[in-house]
Image (cartoon, rainbow, N blue to C red):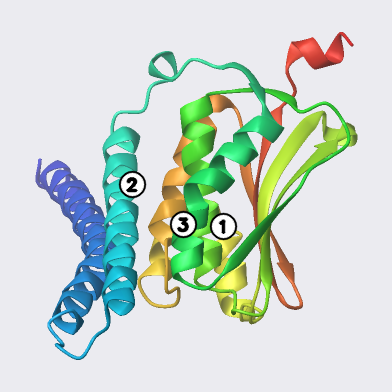
C-alpha cells in the first residue's frame, strides 16, 4: 500500500513538473514580444520622431503583435490535435510557398531582412493539411528571421526526395553555426522545448508545435546544420495523383 501510494505521488509530481516546465516556456515566448511592444510604445512618445519614423515603429508593433497572436493560435490548435479535425488534401507546394512569402514579407521588410523562394522543377503536389503546413512554414521563417543578418538572404525551398518518396519543404537561414551541444539536443525532437529556455533566441516552442502538427499529417520534421547557418524542413508524403503521372 505504501509503495503504491508513493508511486502515485511520484507520477503526480512528475506530471506537475512537466506542466510547470511547459508553462514557463510559453511565458518566455510570450514575454519577449510583449516586452518589445512596450519598448517600442515608449519610443513613440519621443516628440523628436518624424512621421516616417513613427510609421515604422507602428508597423513593427503590428507585425510583432501578429507573430504573438500566431503563436497563441498555434498553441490552442496543438492542445487539441486530432487527425479527423485536420483532414489531408492534395496541396500544390509551390502555391503554398508563395502564400507563405506573401504573409511573411511585411515582417521581413520591417526587420530589414530578405527572403527568397527556390522551387523544385518536379511536380509540387503533396498530401497534407494546408493550414497546418502553412503554420509550420511560418514557424520556420520566424525562426530563421532571428539568425540571419541583413546582408544574407533566407531561402524557402522545395525538393523532391525520390529515394524516400517524400516531398521536402524547408527554410534555409544564414548565420552563426549552432554549437555542437545545442545541435545534438535539437536532433532529439522531444528536447526542443528544453534547449529553448536557455540557448535559443526564438521559437523553439514553435518548432515543438511544428513536430506535433507534422505527426497529425504523417510528416516528419528535420534539420540540417550548415557551416553558415541551418535548414529546417518538413518531409511530406507525395500525393497519389503524383504517383499516377
In this rendering, the answer to whether 139 lies above or below 196 is above
Q: Is residue 205 left or right of residue 94?
A: left
Q: Going 21% across and 68% down the picture, which residue do you hit? A: 31
In the image, taking residue 5 as reference, residue 202 lies left or right, namely right
Counting from the top left corner in percent of width and height, residue 152 is at 68, 75
Judging from the image, what secondary structure is the residue with disc 2 in?
helix
Q: Residue furthest bottom?
A: 48
- Can you tell which mark lies on residue 70? 2
Q: Earlier in the sequence, mark 2 or mark 3?
A: 2
Q: Which residue is mark 3?
A: 106
Residue 4 in view (yes/no): yes
Q: Quadrant of residue 183?
A: bottom right
Contact (CB < 8 A) between labels 2 and 3? no
Q: Where on the picture, by quarter, is residue 34?
A: bottom left
Nearer mark to the viewer, of 3 and 1: 3
Q: Is residue 190 visible?
A: no
Mark 2–mark 1 CB contact (< 8 Å): no
Tell us which disc is closer to us: 2 or 3: 3
- The numbered dot on residue 188 is 1
Image quarter where the N terminus lies is top left
Residue 241 percent location from the top left of the image = 78, 10
Give the crowd class for mark 2: few <14, some 14-19, many >=20 residues within 10 Å: some
Mark 2–mark 1 distance (CA, rounded to whole Å): 25 Å
Residue at 25% across, 58% down: 26
As measured in the structure, the alpha-carbon distance from the residue carrying label 3 to the one carrying label 1 is 33 Å
Amino acid at each position: 500500500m505504501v509503495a503504491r501510494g508513493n508511486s502515485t505521488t511520484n507520477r503526480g509530481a512528475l506530471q506537475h513538473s512537466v506542466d510547470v516546465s511547459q508553462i514557463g516556456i510559453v511565458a518566455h515566448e510570450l514575454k519577449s514580444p510583449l516586452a518589445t511592444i512596450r519598448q517600442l510604445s515608449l519610443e513613440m512618445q519621443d516628440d523628436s520622431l518624424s512621421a516616417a519614423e513613427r510609421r515604422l515603429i507602428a508597423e513593427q508593433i503590428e507585425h510583432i503583435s501578429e507573430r504573438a497572436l500566431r503563436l497563441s493560435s498555434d498553441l490552442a490548435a496543438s492542445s487539441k490535435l486530432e487527425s479527423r479535425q485536420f483532414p489531408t488534401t492534395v496541396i500544390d507546394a509551390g502555391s503554398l510557398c508563395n502564400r507563405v512569402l506573401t504573409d511573411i514579407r511585411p515582417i521581413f521588410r520591417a526587420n530589414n531582412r530578405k527572403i527568397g523562394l527556390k522551387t523544385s522543377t518536379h511536380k509540387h503536389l503533396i498530401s497534407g493539411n494546408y493550414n497546418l503546413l502553412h503554420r509550420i512554414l511560418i514557424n520556420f521563417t520566424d525562426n530563421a528571421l532571428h539568425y540571419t543578418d541583413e546582408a544574407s538572404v533566407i531561402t524557402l525551398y522545395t525538393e523532391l526526395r525520390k529515394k524516400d518518396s517524400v516531398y521536402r519543404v524547408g527554410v534555409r537561414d544564414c548565420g552563426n553555426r549552432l554549437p555542437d551541444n545545442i545541435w545534438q539536443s535539437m536532433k532529439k525532437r522531444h528536447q526542443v522545448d528544453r534547449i529553448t529556455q536557455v540557448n535559443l533566441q526564438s521559437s523553439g516552442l514553435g518548432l515543438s508545435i511544428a513536430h506535433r502538427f507534422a505527426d497529425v499529417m504523417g510528416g516528419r520534421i528535420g534539420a540540417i546544420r550548415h557551416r553558415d547557418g541551418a535548414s529546417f524542413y518538413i518531409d511530406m508524403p507525395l500525393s497519389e495523383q503524383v504517383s499516377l503521372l
